């Protein structure tokens, strides 16, 4: 379990196989073979936030921030 919480439902986020997931939102999607676009965007946002916290490269930071901005517009 990570120290962060899902922005969609507020549940704690977990790391599994290198990906950050929300156990609550993921369980809701188990019935379908593909996650919803919204859920996929939330997962990608969490991954980007993890990368942002790890990198010190200014070019990568700029790239991640642009991606996060685009995701914010789509959610």
Image (cartoon, rainbow, N blue to C red):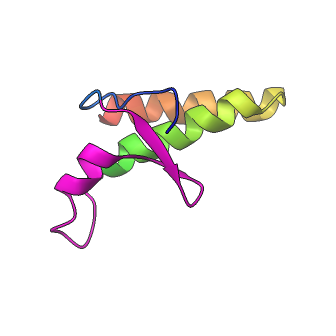
Residue 19 position, x and y percent, is 53, 53
- Figure quadrant of the C terminus: top left
Was residue 16 drawn as part of the magenta stretch in this picture? yes
In this picture, residue 66 sits left or right of residue 4: right
Residue in the image at 26% along x and 31% along y: 8
Please indicate, yes or no, whether residue 36 appears anywhere in the rendered image.
no
Residue in the image at 49% along x and 39% along y: 1
Was residue 40 drawn as part of the magenta stretch in this picture? no
Residue situated furthest bottom in the rendering: 33
Residue in the image at 39% along x and 28% along y: 5
Range of residues picked out in magenta = 11-38
Tell me if residue 10 comes above or below residue 63 in the rendering: above
In this picture, residue 13 sits left or right of residue 48: left
Residue 45 position, x and y percent, is 47, 38
The part of the image, by quadrant, that contains residue 59 is: top right
The one nearer the camera, 22 or 32, is 22
The one nearer the camera, 45 or 5, is 5
Residue in the image at 35% along x and 32% along y: 6
Residue 54 position, x and y percent, is 74, 33
The one nearer the camera, 40 or 60, is 40
Tell me if residue 16 comes above or below residue 14 in the rendering: below
Residue situated furthest front in the rendering: 1
Please indicate, yes or no, whether residue 47 appears anywhere in the rendered image.
yes
The one nearer the camera, 58 or 39, is 39
Residue 23 position, x and y percent, is 32, 47
């Amino acid at each position: 379990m990570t120290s962060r919480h899902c922005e969609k439902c507020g549940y704690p986020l977990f790391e599994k196989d290198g990906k950050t997931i929300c156990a609550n939102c993921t369980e809701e999607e188990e019935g379908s073979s593909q996650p919803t676009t919204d859920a996929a965007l939330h997962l990608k946002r969490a991954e980007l936030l993890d990368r942002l916290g790890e990198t010190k490269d200014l070019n990568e930071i700029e790239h991640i921030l642009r991606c996060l901005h685009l995701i914010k517009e789509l959610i």
